[in-house]
Amino acid sequence: MRTNPYSKSCVDVETQFVSVPCGDRFAYRVTGEESNVPIVLFNHLAGVLDDWDPAVVDGIAAKHRVITFDNRGIGGSQGATPRSVGEMADDAIAFIKALGHSKVDLFGFSLGGAVAQDVVLKEPNLARKLILAGTGPGGGIGITRIPGQAYRNQLRSMMTRKDIRRYLFFTKTKNGLQKATEFLARLKRRKHDRVKPISFKSFRSQLAAISRFGKRSELDWQRIEQPVLVANGEDDIMVPSINSAHLYLGLPDAKLVLYKDAGHAGVFQYHEEFVSEALRFLSD
């Protein structure tokens, strides 16, 4: 009897590589049960393969094949990191097609949510459903302030020797601080085959892309016709939560979930509730 090599936890599956048409190799991991439509996860600013919460990946993987990957120039993937969200979307499309998939679900968190939106706009027939977490539309409120926030809190992180996500992803309440500690502990569960952290050059390129995304004036995102689950914490200081409401109100087929006493990483803070919501959404 054949065993499923992807049935184990995301902290145990091996890192694989696939070449896109330009020749660069992209690093990726596959977790979960075989499903008619796999779900591809797009990561946050500075996020690499090892920065996905195992509680979320494994939770969704209980019912779906989950694919996580490092975009160009990030973590284990080769090449120069693009300086625009549109170019990142082009790379993501090339990666998905290189794996041989013609229909996928997309889950984009933070910067990954911006990339996922552009993927759908560029290749409408590629995506079946879309989950957007901790993100906003192009030109959204406060998005141009993210680079400044990132630099200030990176300095704060270096001075305090605490992970920057403690400051940017979670609320400062007792509950928020406890959930931050638990989240960061889960990220350390993978002990082998970890990829390298983002380089400062790639970090700057991603910030440039976010800045350009925040200055957009067009409302192309309102043309997204796929069902969309929009999720966030009620107190997101990175991508203000009002942007989630704007996505919900502006998209033709959207559902909004906001988590109390939660910030940018509300879907990780309330991972059990979010996974349940995501599985219902994906199965409908």
Image (cartoon, rainbow, N blue to C red):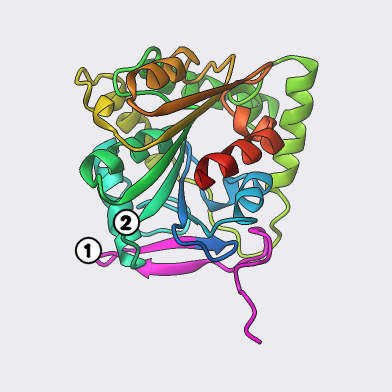
Query: Magenta stretch: residue 16 in it?
Result: yes
Say if 50 sits above or below 45 in the image.
below
Residue 3 location (% of width, % of height): 65, 79
In front here: 111 or 35?
35
Within 10 Å of disc 1 (Cα), the crowding (few <14, some 14-19, many 20+) is few
Q: Is residue 240 left or right of residue 128?
A: right
> Mark 1 highlights which residue?
22
Q: Measuring from the top left, give residue 272's x and y in whole percent.
A: 71, 38
- Residues under numbered marks 1 and 2 in contact, where contact means CB atoms less than 8 Å apart: yes
* Vertical comparison of 148 with 102: above or below: above
- Per the image, label 2 sits on a secondary structure element best described as loop
The residue sitting at 33% across, 46% down in the picture is 81
**Which structural element holds mark 1?**
loop
Identified by mark 2, the residue type is: Gly
Residue 56, image quadrant: top right
Range of the magenta residues?
Answer: 1-28
Which residue is nearer to you in this view: 95 or 123? Answer: 123
Magenta stretch mostly in which secondary structure?
A: loop
- Where residue 159 sits, quadrant-wise, is top right
Instruction: Please indicate whether residue 266 sits to the left or right of residue 137 in the image.
Output: right
Is residue 83 something that shows in the picture?
no
**Quarter the N terminus occupies:** bottom right
Residue 29 part of the magenta-drawn span? no
Please give the residue where the numbered disc 2 appears in the rendered image: 79
Q: Residue 194's spot in the image, x, y percent?
A: 60, 59
Q: Residue at x 62, y 27 (%)?
A: 266
Where, by quadrant of the figure, is residue 186 drawn?
top right
> How packed is label 2: few (under 14 Cα within 10 Å), some, or many (20 or more)?
some
**Residue type beneath disc 1:** Cys
Q: Residue at x 34, y 38 (%)?
A: 226
